Amino acid sequence: MRVYVNIEDKRWKKYKIDFEKIANAAVSSKYKDSEVSITLVDDHEIQKINKKYRKINKPTNVLSFELSDDLLLGDIFISLDTVKKEADAEGISVAEHTAHMVVHGILHLLGYDHIEDKDAEKMEHKETAILKKLGYKNPYATKGCTSAECCPGGKTISWMRGFFGGAFGRTLLYMIFGAISSLGFAPFYMWWWTVIGIWGAYLLSIKCLPGHSWLGKFLRIFPFGMAYAIAMFWWVLHSIYVVPELTQQLAIWTIPGILGIGLAGGIIFNWPFLAISSKRANPACRPFLFASVWAVVLWFREWLLTGFPWNPIANIAIENIYVANAMSLYGALGLTFVIIGLIASLSEIIKNRRIVMNWFSLLLFIVIGAIGVLYGFKNINASAQNCGDNAPVIRIVQPGQSAAQKATHSRTAAIQHANYNVGVMTALASAEGEHDLVVFPETAYPFVMTPGDIMSVARLLSKPTIIGSNFYRDGNLYNSLIVSDSEGTVSNVYNKSHLVPFGEYRPIGNLIPTPGQLTAGDGPELITLKIADKDFVFTPAVCYEIIFSDSLIPGGKIPDAIINITNDNWFGRTPGTYQHLDMVRRYAIESGVPVIRSNYSGISAFVAPDGRIVASIPIGRAGHADGFVCGAHNTLYRTLGMNMWMVIILIFSCLATIWISEVSRNRN
């Protein structure tokens, strides 16, 4: 084969390289009459070519342009600057690395490629064999080992590389990474598994996705989101099996429900990985893109259908009070952005630690994380303020009964159960101890209230009472929080405004059976009670209303507490019950307001404004707890709000990306 060498950078002349010998070693006798052109340039020139023909504005080591002709194979361009840097990093000579680039370029002209793992492995084996003939070592081997098989366990490693390099293996890896990512949340709190899961999926994506169609990328990533969602949210379907009558009606929807969770997860959690899938993406910019799109996904989950922003990544830090309190500045949205950015930037450094700007990206995320932690100290200190002895003592009651004990469809049995349950609650609330207010959980009062009714439980206790009940008015049935004085006179009725789809109303008509068809209330409000000769101002929240950022407290107000009544009976001892409490802790930190939480048979608790659980009643246990709340204050997060923070995150990510891209371009 004839080889034409064009030397555009004179520095190449000092390297005595036999390009014709190298090129001929890379082809068979079939190409003895063929021709190839090799042009030797510098980084500046190859960057211009790379930008013009591949739309990538940075230098590279070698570029090949095939002509799809057996006689005129094509042109190869090799940059001395990049080749020399890579040779120095690998501890080999420029001549040896240039030989590799020539062989690599020739094989591209012959139709070899390395987009797919199996094709890359085939091309690497071919390069290694050719270079061995030329007297050079395997460029892909680790030091002291020329093949995987020469290392301990090498054959197993080679098999695993082959298996996980295939389509089935990659799918399995994505599913494993998705499933283990759920382990950072309650009740496991193994945050490192969430980090490893997202890190693994990130590295797999930037390696395997570039070069594929949009649909191909989507389908490759889909198993991650599917496994992540199913492992995270399977407990939702536990509610079908807590009452026999409900099981009879809805058990048939278990498998479709699991598939629906997987389908939704696969679609929703696809977007951050799709965003980084371009082969033209700057490695130092990718973490900002990945983290900001993940934040957008979390923000969008607040509104999609009726919203379900459960378990933001920020919640893996909830057990670390100092990191978790960064949410008082950034909210769960911003802390999620920081954590995801740290994972992504570390992934880029692991992939290529020699890119200086990768380290800068990591440093930037560390700095904004540290700022959040420092602000969190302020929130922790503020949470301990104004905790005097004259605060009203509040008693929370947890009946601790199962859903089967609580519910039945037999009218006679229902009345018997209702009267018995009222007796149980009253006995628990009547235990010794001084207190000024009693808080019962969601739907604890087993009878439907109407306007003008007397709350019998409050009258029996001779105490101001807050209790959950169904409330009927003007043909509408509500899930309500009822406030009554010590005589049983109802002073306030708060109707739950954020209803549970498929549980409390039918979002798509009668297609899927739904246990209840309730009416939504008017939204957030403040209620003032006169307790112990003081005004006690609280914001009511029924069940999962408290998982939505900015959803409860009217703008600019600072209530003494949030009173959250709930019933986690439906989820038993599954992770959902523990995670629900963590969503309460997150809201307390974001808002700077303590939470009084009464649960029917889950976990009742007093939660401080810094997210600490001051006192609690364990899951499934009947009992009461007396306590008081203090330290309510405003946070910067609540002042700005979730939507403003979303805008700030996007602007910051855009500016960081533009600046890093410009610096990278100038360095090159």
Image: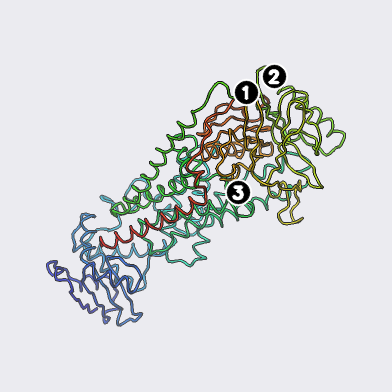
Q: Residue furthest left?
A: 14
Q: Residue furthest right?
A: 412
Nearest the viewer among 631 and 38 is 631
1 vs 3, front mark: 1
* Residue pictured at 57% horizontal, 26% vertical: 615
* Residue pictured at 75% horizontal, 43% vertical: 478
Where the C terminus falls, by quadrant? bottom left
Where does label 3 land, which residue?
A: 308
| Left or right: where 592 falls relative to 442 | left
* Residue pictured at 33% horizontal, 81% vertical: 70
Where does label 2 land, which residue?
A: 431
Q: Cα distance, mark 1 to mark 3?
A: 32 Å
Callout 3: few (<14), some (14-19), or many (20+) C-alpha neighbours within 10 Å? some
The residue tagged with tag 1: helix, strand or loop? Answer: strand
Give how far across and how far down residue 635 sits, in percent. Answer: 49, 40
Give how far across and how far down residue 212 sits, in percent. Answer: 46, 66
Q: Which mark is residue 150?
A: none
Give how far across and how far down residue 1 sits, in percent. Answer: 24, 78
Picture quadrant where residue 620 is located: top right
Query: What amino acid type is highlighted by mark number 3?
Result: Phe
Establish if 237 lies above or below 19.
above
Query: What amino acid type is highlighted by mark number 1?
Result: Asp
Establish if 260 lies above or below 129.
above
Where does label 1 land, which residue?
A: 626
Nearest the viewer among 333 and 570 is 333
Give how far across and how far down residue 371 sits, in percent. Answer: 39, 42
Callout 2: few (<14), some (14-19), or many (20+) C-alpha neighbours within 10 Å? few
Nearest the viewer among 549 and 85 is 549
Q: Earlier in the sequence, mark 2 or mark 1?
A: 2
Callout 1: few (<14), some (14-19), or many (20+) C-alpha neighbours within 10 Å? some
